[in-house]
Amino acid sequence: MTIEATDPQLAAYPALSAYLAQQSQQSQQAGQFEEAPPTYPTYPAYPAHPAPPVQPAQPIHPVQPADPAPDPAPVPAQPRPERSGPTREVFAERAPQTAAETGAATGAGADAGTGAVRVPALRIRPRVMRRGIVAGAGAVSLLWGSQAEPSARLDALFAGAAHLSGLLAGYGILVMLLLMARVPAVEHGVGADRLARWHSLGGRYVLGLVGAHGVLALCGYAAYTGTDVLRATAQLLGYGGIVAAVFGTLALGAAGVSSVRVARARISQETWRAVHFLTYLGAALAFAHQLVGPDVSGSPLTVWAWAMLHATVAVLIVWYRGVVPVRQALRHGLRVVEVRDESPDVVSVVMRGTGLDALRAEPGQFLRWRFVQRRLWHTSLPFSLSAPVRDDTVRITVKALGVHSRRMRRLRPGTRVLATGPFGAMTAHRRTRRKVLLLAGGVGITPMRVLFEALPAAPGDLTLLYRASNAAQLVLRDELEAIAVARGAALHYLLGPSDAAFDPLAPQALRDLVPELAEHDVYLCGPGPMAAAATASLVKAGVPQQHIHSEQFSF
């Protein structure tokens, strides 16, 4: 089922009609269409302000009414602004004229109250990050090769393999910690979901290398001394560095076991996080073990370089996971203002603080929220913004999917909130094409709603498809329709059960809904199965994989 949001029945939105009339008068006076995303003051759900009593205006793009009003004369397109970087192109009918407009499109701008121009945030691309990780592993292998002595003896072969696997395991531990250090340049460039997948996959390799290192070292020592494995084990445990390595291995193993899918489903999030903190202990003990090993301790320069790598990662973890969250909490003083029901199982939480522009949260990003209230304070929850930061007010919209999200409905006004972030890379910086399709499923509409308002786009270049089981599950509907009318964008509701005979996300259905689908950048957010099915359909419909941008917020 498809519902057009640009229906001309504006009588249901008198305040919106007044606003559109006012914008139309201003556009005529200026002689051009203002493409910068407007501030919509009449949304019934996010902070509302009365509009002046003006007569209703005609919609921008009526859907074939009985007596259609003539379309406004087209405005000649101005030359597209030059690109300032590989991902900085702004698709609009005119170049930004003010610092505020430039900041909305590129992430730069002026700090509120100071006028100081902000420098665009550094972003490390996934490809660059992968190459850096591989290059680091190559450097570690070269370090091992420069010190290895060729030998055909069995004990030497075991020892050489043990040294290489141990060095790579130590390096891998550093990489795993760096991926989860919440460094903004990495988070905003690579994306939190991709980092989590890399961390999960890399953890398996690290545990495999750690296990291989232990077995190879034990076999090499047994071959060198000519004793059996049990006696060799007893002798090795007499060395302090070996004991540290054993305890470090146990700590890493406990963190790995707790992340196995079967175990993860049986333990609480708090228990999982507590066990995962053992990774820090394992890394520290592994570092102590490596300092006494021949590959690192053989050269003062190697000891210094290895120590500096560990110190750098440790500083990044302490700063971005410890200092920055505390500083943000003290600076912004966020508190809950209102908890509003959007549907039987969805609520919006409105919060207010001070200096929230300093967060520099971009449309499509999320923050980690900690609500200082009983049974919630000990858990940091990742939720996307469902509206732009406006007047030091932020809003998130949450569906009751788990224990903690169900407790959000019982939040009281005045509850203190600790917010860390922003995180995520599903922003305008990933955009490479003029036309954009936003595809949302369920509560995945929250980041799409902000992008729907804020992405620079000419009328007709922006489309939102919203998948839901029925009309009662549509969230923020009034706001979406108001934005669609004001921006001349297309809005389609794809309603029906997921097991219905007709699939609105089938390749041909998508091509019918979105003309020139293959020429669009696609932003996608929704439940895992829906996102996977939509991605497969988009690829079959001709959209290149690199033009499909999505993030899954399941950690």
Image (cartoon, grey):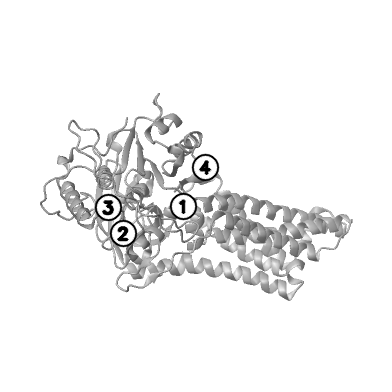
**Rendering coords of residue 257 (x, y %):** 58, 49
Mark 1 or mark 3, which is nearer to you? 3
Mark 1 surroundings within 10 Å by alpha-carbon count, few (fewer than 14), some (14 through 19), many (20 or more): many
The alpha-carbon separation of the residues under discs 4 and 3 comes to 33 Å
**Contact? badges 4 and 3 (CB < 8 Å):** no
Give the residue type that dot 2 points to: Val
Query: Looking at the rendering, which quadrant does residue 464 occupy?
Result: top left
CB atoms of marks 1 and 2 within 8 Å: no
Q: Is residue 173 left or right of residue 335?
A: right
Left or right for 108, reference 282? left
Quarter that holds the N terminus: top left
Q: Mark 3 sits on what residue?
A: 33
Query: For the residues carrying marks 4 and 2, which lies nearer the camera in this image?
Result: 4
Which badge, 1 or 2, comes first in the chain's sequence? 2
Numbered badge on residue 430: 1
* Within-10-Å neighbours for mark 3: few <14, some 14–19, many 20+: some
In the rendered image, the vertical position of residue 74 relative to residue 109, given as above or below: above
Q: Are marks 4 and 1 in contact (CB under 8 Å)?
A: no
Q: CA distance from mark 4 to mark 1?
A: 13 Å
Image-based side of 238 in relation to 105, left or right = right
Name the residue type under label 4: Gln
Q: Position of residue 83 (x, y in %)?
A: 46, 58
Q: Nearer the viewer, residue 128 or 33?
A: 33
Q: Residue 210, position in %: x, y?
A: 68, 55
- Pair 2/3: label in front: 3
| Picture quadrant where residue 223 is located | bottom right
